[in-house]
Amino acid sequence: MTYKSVTEILEAIKKKDISATEITKDYFKRIKASDDLNCFITLTEDSALNRAKKIDKDISKNNLKPLSGLPIAQKDIFCTKGVKTSCGSKMLDNFISPYDATVVDKLNEAGTIMLGKTNMDEFAMGSSNETSFYGAVKNPWDYEYVPGGSSGGSASAVAARISPCSTGTDTGGSIRQPASLCGICGLKPTYGRVSRFGMIAFASSLDQAGLFTTDALDAAILLKEISGHDPKDSTSSTVEVPNYHDYCINSDKKNFTVGIPEEFVNDLNDDVKNSFYESVKILENIGCKIKTINLKHTGLGVSAYQVVAPAECSSNLSRFDGVRYGHRSKKSESLESLYRESRSEGFGKEVKRRILVGTYALSAGYYDAYYLKAQKVRNLIAQDFSQAFEKVDLILGPTTPDKAFKIGEKMNDPIAMYLSDVYTVSTNLAGLPAMSIPMGFKEGMPLGLQIIGNHFDEKDILKLSYLYQKETDWHEQEPGA
Amino acid sequence: MWETVIGLEIHVQLATDSKLFSSSSTNFGSEQNTQASIIDLAMPGVLPVLNKKAVNMAIMFGLAVDAKIADKSIFARKNYFYPDLPKGYQISQYELPVVYDGKLEINVEGKSKTVGITRAHLEEDAGKSIHDLFDGESAIDLNRAGTPLIEIVSEPDMRSAKEAVTYLKKIHSIVKSLGISDGNMEEGSFRCDANISLRKPGEDFGIRAEIKNINSFRFVENAINYEVGRQQDILESGGAVNQETRLYDPKKDETRPMRSKEEANDYRYFPDPDLLPVEITEKQISEIKKSLPELPDAKKERFIEEYGLKNADAEILSSSLDLSEYFEKASSNVSSKFQLLANFILSEVVGLSNKHNLDISKAPVSSEEVAKLITYVSDEKISIKQAKEVLNESWQNKTDVDEIIKSKSIEQISNIDLLSDEAKKILEKHPKEVQDYKNGKDKLMGFFVGQVMKETQGKANPKALNQILNKLLKGE
């Protein structure tokens, strides 16, 4: 039994070649065999099998939903009712969510079966999955390497084929970067395309829920199910949700004008450069027109991001105070010590660093110099993009400057770590959709191609990815094969 | 000579059914923490959704005080830690409030002045910390957390405690008239912070102290007067006032320091990324304008026109919704003598309310009963003096005025024949005095009236009696 994609699994279930229970059991077998990847914080085997049974019953009555019986792994940043939702932190190690996030709710409604909650950088702050309270996740291509972060568990699980798909969140690259380092597809939709309700906030104006799959069509199927306006999230959009899958298959669009920003390719190492330009050639062969463009303010992206994201996080994480839920220090004798000790014990080093940076950036006397200035840079970056999209349909570049780095390599150099987000942060700052798809290997480790679209143009990103994947087989490569 | 400078910040709880950013009920007095949803509890991952009714109420207020309504206003986070603030920040408005640049005219001792209203912004209330329920532990009730408030910030335009209280009462009257708040001060629906400083006239503003959370009109007046005295003592002995936050203790009638400027929080305000800017259209404003109820100033004009009241009385009656409602209810039960009714309410009923520290809306003598008294006075059934006595007794014993009048048989004798008989008897008894009167001793009229009153146990209608005596003595 080897089903390679979401599409194949749904097809097999529909045809009753396999039951939801069988496929669920199979994935738990795989998960257990790959235990040392450390992809999961919590496994929900009992509830998954119960649910699979119920879905099989529904299927026997021909009550089929769009994703009936599809196993999925949820990043542990999404609240799941009755299940521990830790956000990768000691602070929430004892937190059982009383409600489901909208994304979880929608996927449940569509018929998916949750396998468990995936490991992640603490509160999504990190690019390597090493800041997790539950330990580092390993890259299935080589266990000495990081899978990327913050959605490291979700990416590693899909790459290792121990889950056919998973959810992630992307604040500065947390879906695309691990997708790139693990050799799978990672889609970050437009800000507002998918509800943020129930997704534990890191930086509210940047956070966006998205998906990991092995190919573009799978992402297209899933995106439709999680998208749409949510009355519980004021920042979610009312823009209509198209049928991405049908668009990929049926539209004859292929001669996209694709822009390559000089700023994304100037400093690339030879391996990444070669893989990238080979991909460009393939796109030209498909019928795309390639144009060199400029995104002048790209170089300021990481700096602006490292002010805006910590500023918002410093406020978002204030609720973790040991009063109502989460970690409460035994050493608390007064109100002040309750706060101080609970937060000192509950948060890890990187989270503390960002809270401090953010608190500083918002303080009286520094607000204008940091937060306001960062917002101005943000506007300039958004302007760069909107000017570019007057000339091109899509923008192309490598997802990351290099292949995955080794576990431990950058842990003591936060600046180097932050710079691995250089090509991804600017789309978050501009609220644009982007996707990373596999484009080759460097020394046996995967490399990712990033396709950026205009607001709410996920369908063309998916279409181009689909066309590219028809011509290549990078996405079909499996680790350890 | 010191000049007092006062600015007020008023927190008004809005009378919406649900909270500012969640669908939890805003009822007062429910069991602890039963009106706190996952949003009010600040569970991880939850998001606020704005209650548009609260925005409309803020617009109503803005229109009532002649203010500008922002076409785009922004919610900001005010960051600080406190156990009854579940998110660790309060969602408020900072740079772009929904209402700004308004004004209100007040009238104190016959002089009118305009108080500037800097801004009125929407924000959510915090929960309550209860420190005296459990020994050594604090309890938190989050029922109130997220209740919508408008904070109304005045310019430092007031110069005395009286002006401040007059302004406060008028704002109270406006929010109640608009129906956007129940204005209940005991339950905390209407609270006030006062900023007070002293200066030599013509000089720059002095250093101010802020008195927090004063919850009655009387306390506001007392707190300001105490604070003015305190600051005056400091300044006159050559000292300097500390910029600090103080609390008013009504039991000791004094203010004492809460925290100083050095300990003040840096709230790190920034726009809340979870909420979109609030956009208000001209159309929305004009629709709200059309639906506005009558406001105090319009009511005053109507009282003058409709009831022929004196300007000063109309001003006072219209400045409080409770008072104007009491008056209007009473006036619908009398056919004329509105000025007499107004005088009676303003001096007697208000007097008794103040004496017993009661809201007039809770007066034990209803406006209908007062209307009866005024009708009896105007029908000359009882004298005004008797009306006051009956009111007092009715207030104390909570008995109907008719019953009191009956049981004490203090109904006036206005029957002309009856009074004539009594008067004739008296004149016959005192022939010498009659003669003296006829010879020009006018003062004796009082004697005759007194004698008839004595005979009738004071029940004779004085006006009718005067006429009868005049007729009998002068043959008029």
Image (cartoon, helix red, strand yellow):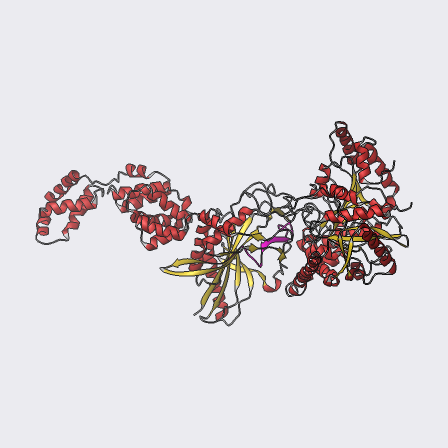
Residue range (magenta): B82-101
Give percent across and percent down for residue B107: 39, 58
- Does the image show residue A334? no
Q: Is residue B297 above or below residue A115?
A: below
Left or right of A185: which side holds B322? left
Q: Is residue B199 above or below residue B438?
A: below
Q: Is residue A50 above or below residue B75?
A: above
Q: Indicate the quadrant where residue A219 lies.
A: top right
Residue B322 lies within the magenta run: no
Q: Indicate the quadrant where residue A366 lies.
A: bottom right
Residue located at (28% from left, 45% from top)? B336
Left or right of A211: which side holds A33? right
Closer to us: B399 or B18? B18
Closer to us: A135 or B63? B63
Give percent across and percent down for residue A285: 82, 51
Give percent across and percent down for residue B98: 54, 54
Give percent across and percent down for residue A354: 73, 58
Identify the main secondary structure in magenta. loop
- Does the image show residue B58? yes
Which image quadrant: the N terminus of chain B? bottom left
Residue B89 lies within the magenta run: yes
Residue at the extreme top of the image, as rendered: A61
